[in-house]
Amino acid sequence: MDFLTLIQILDSTVRLATPLLLACLAGLYSERAGVVDIGLEGKMLVAAFLAGAVSYVTGSVWLGMLAAIAGSTALSMIHGLASITFRGDQLISGVALNFLAAGLTVVVGQAWFGLGGRTPSLSNGGRFEPITLPFADAVADVPVLGPIYEELISGHTLLVYVAFALVPLTWWVLYRTRFGLRLRAVGENPSAVDTAGISVVRLRFTALVIAGVLCGLAGAYLATLAAGFVKDMTAGRGYIALAALIFAKWRPWYALSATLLFGLLEAIGNRYQSIEIGAFEIPVQFMQALPYILTVVILAGFVGKAIPPRAGGSPYVKER
Amino acid sequence: MTMMRKILGATAALAISATAVLAEPAIIFDLGGKFDKSFNEAAFSGAERWAEETGGSYKDVELQSDAQREAALRGFADRGYNPIVMAGFSFATALNTVAADYPDTKFVLIDMVVDQPNVKSVVFAEHEGSYLVGVLAAMASKSGTVSFIGGMDIPLISKFACGYAQGVKDTKGDATVIVNMTGTTPSAWNDPVKGGELTRAQMSQGSDVVFAAAGGTGLGVLQTAADQGILSIGVDSNQNYLQPGSVLTSMVKRVDNAVYEAFSAGENVMPGFSAMGLDNDGVGYTVDEFNKSLITDEMMAAVEDAKAKIISGEIMVHDYMSDESCPSF
């Protein structure tokens, strides 16, 4: 494998990891606040649909992104209403959202465009353009570092840079701000937070709003990358993000490495569909199953003990 | 007792009215959905064409999961629809169990063979059509490397890939053909983002013409090819218009004709085996105003020559499904 191939695989890794990272961070905020969020997939799907539809109708990718964020946040609020306000089961509410999203996007899309849930292809104004960072062309000829900067770091769309910037930001918010402390506390011991006079309900809703916004970005990324919405286009990425979140033990930097790892495995699977090692050939099915095999293996013990936020999954009841 | 009799009577009346009124045809679409711009949509347009020309009506359903196949079949058969057309090879197992229970209903299965006295199996010679687009791809390619992206990894899709590879290699002996499959589950038909990534991966290996036989995933392939300035080849329906100037041609499979013929024949569908190939225009390549500028006279002559030779039997295109292997890979 030569150097250029390596760069290309890493470049592909970055593109594939971005939606996972955004969804993973969304799950991180939500679960750190004690709300299990299995509805990441559904939120991304609705966001992808709205991004595709609104970008096409208005011709503006920005309006599309806003619509994506609004739609995804609305689903988040339904999740909050069911599981925080009415203390319903968080898993069931999340699964319901996934089904709702899968059905609703197709039905609304069919009524709107008559293309069977697909949205029309986005032309250039409706998509994010790749951003060429300064001097990218100038340094392209510099050995080693040139291609790294030009191919790998430069030339992605805006949301890729946003996603990567969100990792340190999330770390800072969680560990260096008062809000972050409270957010973590409400996922571990909500009654202590309540005793301190801070609203558990409000904190959890805030976390869900953030999760909604991030899923909105993830969905908008998918739709603008593929230049349109196709039904079920998230293809299980929400669940992979959830696995990455557990793998990362609910911490932002680990979330980055976990999602990059999943992205890398997918990129390798795309590039080398069957690898020959000596006389033995690894079949393509194995390469494509690798992310899932890895999830099982890792969760079965290699990450050490993944301890979820203690109050995760249970609705908060003020007095018992 | 009277209650029982009433219910029985009502059911009987219903059953009679159902068979008396309805001898309408029905069609079941596969998981890709009837607007997939590809295989299912071709079937849908055939059904629509029949409805428009005859003024008749038909019933259709789109499946949401594999588990619904048998239920959908029995549902239509119970309600007296005849014939029942199934778009997709995946119905074979379900049809094999259901067909015997409804001897008076005619079933038409597209893309797969089920040997039952009341089933008509329509099979397309995808390898022949793919061979032709392979010829075009080899001549349009400047780098000498072309590629193929399949949807789900199944023998039918390998049949496309194999015919394509043979077409390329017969035209340009030293050409390289890269073959990739999107996945091994049905979600592989609906992942345009992954389709785009596969396209980029193949491009980085030198490919400049990519043939997508991957349903909704293929839309991502065509899009990425257009973005990156390489050529692509569409499949099943004519997809030339999706990315004008970038789609070299489309390997069309006239599923619409198969559905149209089945609907037109109505209850008198002849059970048995029907092959749709180049000789009866069951498969082919498309040239229209969107790709005219991409296909030179020389290419046109070569592909027409190949077509004639396949029909006359001078060129034998290898059918992957006959022995699950491909000499051209």
Image (tube, rainbow, N blue to C red):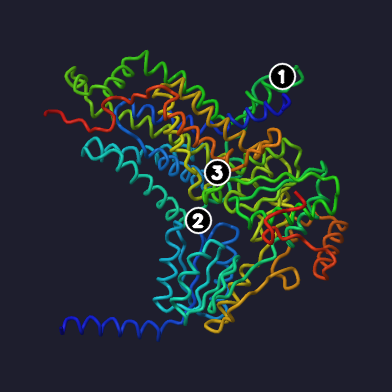
Q: Residue furthest front?
A: A279
Q: Earlier in the sequence, mark 2 or mark 3?
A: 3
Q: CA distance from mark 1 to mark 2?
A: 45 Å
Q: Residue at x 57, y 77 (%)?
A: B262
Secondary structure, mark 1, is helix
Q: Earlier in the sequence, mark 3 or mark 1?
A: 3
Q: CA distance from mark 3 to mark 1?
A: 35 Å
Residue that mark 2 sits on:
A113
Residue that mark 3 sits on:
A59
Classify B29 as above or below A155: below
Q: Residue at x 32, y 33 (%)?
A: A36
- Residue A217 as seen in the image, left or right of residue A277: left
- Residue A32 as seen in the image, left or right of residue B89: left
A217 vs B116, nearest the viewer: B116
Crowding around mark 3 (Cα neighbors within 10 Å: few <14, some 14 to 19, many 20+) is: some
Q: Nearer the viewer, mark 3 or mark 1?
A: 1
Label drawn at residue A146:
1
Q: Quadrant of the N terminus of chain B?
A: bottom left
- Name the amino acid, label 3: Gly
Q: Residue at x 37, y 49 (%)?
A: A100
Secondary structure, mark 2, is helix
At which x and y percent is residue A251?
A: 41, 21
At which x and y percent is residue A132?
A: 65, 26
Crowding around mark 2 (Cα neighbors within 10 Å: few <14, some 14 to 19, many 20+) is: few
Label 2 marks which chain's residue?
Answer: A
- Name the amino acid, label 1: Gly
